Image (spheres, rainbow, N blue to C red):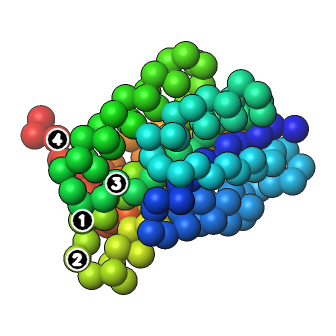
Amino acid sequence: MDKIGIVDTMFARFDMGAEAVSELRECPGHGERFEVVRRTVPGFKDLAVAAKQLIEIEGCRIVVALGMPGKAPIDKACAHEASTGIMLAQLMTSTPILEVFVHEDEEEDPADLVAVFEERSRKHARNAYWMLYEPDQLARRAGQGVRQGYADAGPIASQA
């Protein structure tokens, strides 16, 4: 049975991992074709190692790494470093790790921020599923300005 990894953080102010797991449980083949393996780490700088362990030790074929950088400039700098670590872990393992960050200052209204957390976590979990089992779903959306967490931007019409 395949494994899809979910790694999230305690630092995030919303349970992004639960949303991602919930979405994957709704996908065809859950429990038969694939199972979900979830780990939680303290903060987003810990995501890369946990994702790498999910791949190398747990045998996950893809991992969704979920985190929430805070508002302070140091948080944004640390998010960049965490992102670099996630990219390195992908290269070291030749396995996709979908980085899913929701920045605390993306929305002022807490209800709007929750909506971004929910939608981005769920859509990227679905993207992970599609990458493994239905890559044509992604190809059909190529160039369509698809967004996770906000309304789709839509394509830019050809000028030719």
Residue beneath the point at 77% across and 56% down: 28
Disc 4 marks which residue?
A: 158
Residue 152: percent from left, percent from top: 32, 60
Give the mark nearest the N terminus, 4 or 1: 1
Residue beneath the point at 38% across and 68% down: 116
**Residue 30 vs residue 39: left or right?**
right
Q: Please state which of residues 76 and 22 is positioned toward the viewer in this rendering.
A: 76
Residue 87: percent from left, percent from top: 43, 27
Disc 3 marks which residue?
A: 69
Q: Are marks 3 and 4 in contact (CB under 8 Å)?
A: no
Amino acid marked by disc 4: Ser
Amino acid marked by disc 2: Glu
Disc 1 marks which residue?
A: 105
Distance from label 2 to label 3 (Cα)? Answer: 15 Å
User: Quadrant of the image for the C terminus?
Assistant: top left
Q: Please state which of residues 157 and 18 is positioned toward the viewer in this rendering.
A: 18
Amino acid marked by disc 1: Asp
Distance from label 3 to label 4 (Cα)? Answer: 36 Å
Disc 2 marks which residue?
A: 108
Q: Are marks 2 and 1 in contact (CB under 8 Å)?
A: yes
Tag 1 secondary structure: loop
Q: Are marks 2 and 3 in contact (CB under 8 Å)?
A: no
Residue 95 visible from this viewpoint: yes
Give the mark nearest the N terminus, 1 or 3: 3
